[in-house]
Image: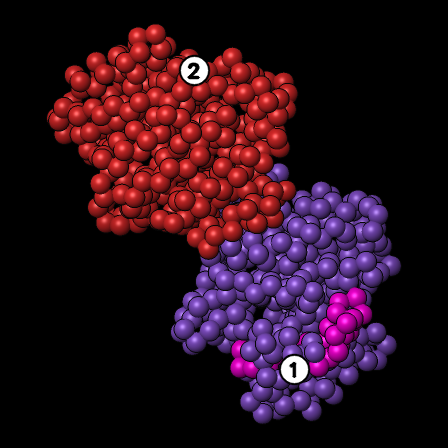
Chain colours: A red, B purple
Amino acid sequence: MPAEWEPHSQTWMAWPERPDNWRNGAKPAQAAFSAVARAIAEFEPVTVCVSAGQYDNARARLNHGNIRIVEMSTDDAWVRDTGPTFVSNAAGEVRGVDWTFNAWGGFDGGLYWPWQRDDQVARKVLEIEGCQRYRTEGFVLEGGSIHVDGEGTLITTEECLLNLNRNPHLSREQIEAVLREHLAIDTVIWLPDGLFNDETDGHVDNFCCYVRPGEVLLAWTDDAGDPNYPRCQAAMRVLESARDAKGRPLVVHKMPIPGPIHATAEECAGVDTAEGSQPRDPSIRLAGSYVNFLIVNGGIIAPRFDDPKDAEAEAILKRLFPGHRVVLVPGREILLGGGNIHCITQQQPAAQQR
Amino acid sequence: MPAEWEPHSQTWMAWPERPDNWRNGAKPAQAAFSAVARAIAEFEPVTVCVSAGQYDNARARLNHGNIRIVEMSTDDAWVRDTGPTFVSNAAGEVRGVDWTFNAWGGFDGGLYWPWQRDDQVARKVLEIEGCQRYRTEGFVLEGGSIHVDGEGTLITTEECLLNLNRNPHLSREQIEAVLREHLAIDTVIWLPDGLFNDETDGHVDNFCCYVRPGEVLLAWTDDAGDPNYPRCQAAMRVLESARDAKGRPLVVHKMPIPGPIHATAEECAGVDTAEGSQPRDPSIRLAGSYVNFLIVNGGIIAPRFDDPKDAEAEAILKRLFPGHRVVLVPGREILLGGGNIHCITQQQPAAQQR
């Protein structure tokens, strides 16, 4: 699996529309997704998967020469988790892993039902691209639960991958074996937990990511009263003692956590009530994170929250990615739906010899 | 517009499913379409557009390494008429014309309503391929109503293109001007009518086609009692006196007409009744035609009808296309729905300098 900073042929997205997750008929979310798509499209092509009913509307709102629209039915818009995980071989041939998807926990804490259309997204994407597909029938994984350095190391969280609502029939070693086999991984670094209140059961992409081989960026708080404090401490202990696949210790950079951010009563009131959907309430702290950014060809597309820490986050990203142009895009509407920019995007590596 | 015998990058199809046009829940038609797709796939790649609900089923039935499935909602499966008409320029760049589609006549004799999804097919196909699009807003045309020699000549029928249910606001000269502009046509040859009882209002692709520059193949009967007799005679008079864009007279080959073919009562009983849909009755003669074949890379995919004239039709095609392998595929189920192999396929020319 190539690292995210390796050249992309394009980035995939899906169009938000379900009114029991996105307020006000998903119109604010559609505007937010459009801004993300247009920001990425300044760096590389974007393909957005859109339902038949929203095709015309999406086409109109995504009016950019570098954005392609394809019809595809989905259950929601988290293509990081529903799309394929692209891999490539030494000859540069790009293929895709089609993990089984169960909406982040199936009937044991999953976020919606049914999830059949979402589970089909990866195969449909791969078929459009003419890429060969590896289907992991019975092995549940979401792309947002892993990050790789492209040199044999993968970071994930126990909270997610060892959760009994994912692959309860498999041990940690058996799960590692699947990752090794499908992604050519030598070393798995297990953080205990992800960010507090992350609906995905602690996806690593909202908490800790690679910025280059040997260097990671970890969401961080020094406030001992913040429920994220023990999570950050525990992750730091793992990262400080870890060695990657090349035997290197890791340099750990810290990224402040915005907020705490809560939805307003008005924002929550705009979400449809539906049986089995996530409740939305101003009392629930949202899992906002600047780590949830996407690396594109020459750019960093990161969320801003109109938060006092926005400027510091931007400065950190600029320092860590001196060769990239850092673009901050409003992330609050995406966060209200349960994730952020990395969660709603999936990079497709360019076909190139490695 | 390249001629059909020029190299293709692939052929497009769409998956039949509407039960008010295809008997027995479209299962016999799906088998027939699958046989066509597999026959083409022996010569060139095929992409089949399939609704979300039929995606898995189509994927299973189209189990061939050269057949790609993409999700697309349609109103029916006639991609010759709903898909783009591909054109290319001297540099070899392939683009598409997205004609306005009104289900063969709109509210004045059209075959179903709504037709919105079908009208979107061309743009969706072009977007998947990344091809630029020319939309003829307000100019109604179906791909099956034209045939070209790739050297500036187009053949069509007055019955269709001058029908008041297509472009009543345009004169013959104005229609010719649109064809000239979009397809780089110099000469339009107007046959009076197409085949008897053709639901499309006489599409030329069920009646007369080019086999190479300067040579056409015309459906033919010598039976003066056949309602096709005056149609064939009138077409022959036009063709014998015509000069193509290069100033050549035409060689006219004759192709016998099968049948007469009628649906059985049992076949008609398998079709759902729906307001506005075509009535199906054993008394109605079907517009069966061997001319309704597709030229692919190195092959001819033509219908057979288990008719006494099948062998003669095959022999004629082999004689006219000595460099192609002629493959006959059962066409009756497709005919029951209102067309045949050429109607359900759309070739995409290869990108090559001309």
Q: Which residue is mark 1?
A: B188
Q: Is residue B76 left or right of residue A241?
A: right
- Circle 2 crowding by C-alpha within 10 Å: few under 14, some 14–19, many from 20: some
Disc 2 and disc 1 on one polypeptide chain: no
Residue for point 77% across, 57% down: B111
Residue for point 70% across, 78% down: B174
Magenta stretch, residue numbers: B148-173
The image position of residue A207, as x and y in percent, is: 33, 23
The image position of residue A194, as x and y in percent, is: 35, 18
The image position of residue A304, as x and y in percent, is: 40, 32
Q: Is residue A245 left or right of residue B251?
A: left
Q: Which residue is mark 2?
A: A197
- Circle 1 crowding by C-alpha within 10 Å: few under 14, some 14–19, many from 20: many
Q: Amino acid at mark 1?
A: Val
Q: Are marks 2 and 1 in contact (CB under 8 Å)?
A: no
Query: Can the viewer see residue B91?
Result: yes
